[in-house]
Image: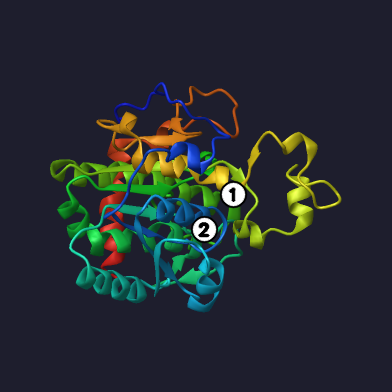
């Protein structure tokens, strides 16, 4: 069953809106926020914008020196703490430590991720993209759920991608143990998982007044592409032979700042009241695909199916119990 309210609203913003436009007039003073992956790419821009609006932002980082170097000089209340999404023990230590310092969590932005990497195992043998992009964030939410519920009006934003179109959940073998590993389909599965996570978490936050959303940020050149050789990005039509964004791909790509605006919109817009669990793109709720061949827009039904969301939540709980 497709999650309710998956219909665009009359948003004043669009794909090229800037952070200062989306957050104009928004005061986040006194609000606590966590942004995973908040020290590079669109995560860095998300932290910059939230801190400028008054939020107290914590950035979990696997490499604290790199995080400090990236975040140095950005104005606002920004803190860095050690955490590796690929290591559940590390995620639990961070979450428990955070819960000892604050009484509520208002914004959780699950921004970090890996894309199209060589076959790699993390944790108890999880495929790296599923294990990091989904299971790491699932473990984090598992620890922080009491803080989110205590907030009363928290918002959780899970960064998905148009890549979700590449694969539904491989229910019989989500960790690709059958030898058929495909880096792009594995990425697609993890992005479908991020979207379904938002649907299921929203159901668990509803009673306390919280909401969760999935977001497709758009095409942005960031360190997320670190596993892709230039030749592959040329073949995909993203870059030209000189390594620059190809002319035909310019309409698809955004700046890193523009790439964080849908996250900011999902985290703050009053237009989303009563619309928890939806998948958003270009500062709006995305329309559901009706089968038309559109590569970079709309959401596929399998990524907003509430039955699948509950099935994935149950599966994730079982997997987490083995870590």
Disc 2 marks which residue? 44
Q: Depth check: 181 or 187 in front?
A: 187
Residue 182 appearing in the image: no
Question: Residue 252's spot in the image, x, y percent?
Answer: 65, 36
Give left or right: position of 20 versus 109: right
Disc 1 marks which residue? 256
Q: Are marks 2 and 1 in contact (CB under 8 Å)?
A: yes
On the image, which quarter does residue 91 sit in? Answer: bottom left
Tell me which residue sits at (33%, 58%) in the image.
138
Tell me which residue sits at (26%, 68%) in the image.
321
Q: Depth check: 34 or 232 in front?
A: 34
Question: Residue 258's spot in the image, x, y percent?
Answer: 56, 42
Tell me which residue sits at (69%, 58%) in the image.
228
On the image, which quarter does residue 229 sit in? Answer: bottom right
Tell me which residue sits at (42%, 38%) in the image.
24
Give left or right: position of 239 versus 181: right
Quadrant location, the N terminus: top left
Give left or right: position of 103 versus 12: left
Label 2: few (<14), some (14–19) or many (≥20) C-alpha neighbours in 10 Å: many
Residue 146 appearing in the image: yes
Dot placed on the residue nearer the N-terminal end, 2 or 1: 2
- Name above or below for residue 199 compared with residue 147: above
Secondary structure, mark 1, is helix
Quadrant location, the C terminus: bottom left
Question: Residue 49's spot in the image, x, y percent?
Answer: 46, 51
Question: Residue 102's spot in the image, x, y percent?
Answer: 22, 66
Q: Depth check: 213 or 230 in front?
A: 213
- Name above or below for residue 209 compared with residue 7: below
């Amino acid at each position: 069953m497709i999650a309710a309210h998956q219909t665009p609203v009359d948003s004043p913003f669009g794909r090229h809106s800037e952070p200062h436009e989306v957050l104009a007039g928004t005061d986040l003073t006194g609000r606590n926020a966590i942004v995973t992956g908040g020290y590079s790419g669109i995560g860095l821009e998300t932290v910059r914008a939230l801190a400028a609006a008054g939020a107290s932002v914590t950035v979990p980082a696997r490499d604290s020196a790199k995080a400090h170097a990236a975040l140095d000089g950005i104005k606002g209340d920004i803190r860095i703490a050690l955490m590796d999404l690929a290591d559940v023990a590390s995620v639990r230590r961070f979450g428990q430590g955070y819960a000892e310092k604050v009484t509520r969590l208002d914004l959780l932005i699950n921004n970090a991720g890996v894309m199209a990497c060589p076959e790699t195992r993390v944790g108890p043998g999880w495929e790296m993209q599923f294990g990091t992009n989904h299971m790491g964030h699932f473990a984090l939410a598992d620890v922080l759920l009491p803080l989110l519920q205590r907030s009363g009006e928290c918002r959780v934003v899970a960064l998905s991608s148009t890549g979700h179109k590449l694969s539904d959940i491989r229910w019989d073998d989500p960790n690709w143990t059958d030898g058929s590993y495909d880096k792009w389909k594995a990425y697609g599965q993890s992005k479908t998982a991020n979207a379904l996570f938002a649907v299921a978490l929203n159901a668990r936050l509803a009673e306390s007044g919280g909401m969760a959303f999935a977001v497709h940020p758009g095409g942005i050149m960031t360190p997320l592409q670190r596993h892709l050789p230039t030749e592959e990005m040329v073949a995909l039509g993203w870059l030209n032979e000189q390594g620059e964004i190809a002319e035909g791909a310019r309409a698809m790509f955004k700046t890193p700042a523009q790439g964080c605006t849908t996250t900011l919109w999902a985290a703050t817009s009053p237009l989303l009241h009563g619309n928890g669990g939806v998948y958003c793109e270009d500062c709006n709720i995305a329309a559901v695909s009706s089968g038309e061949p559109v590569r970079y827009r709309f959401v596929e039904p399998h990524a907003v199916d509430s039955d699948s969301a509950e099935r994935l939540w149950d599966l994730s709980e079982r997997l987490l119990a083995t870590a």
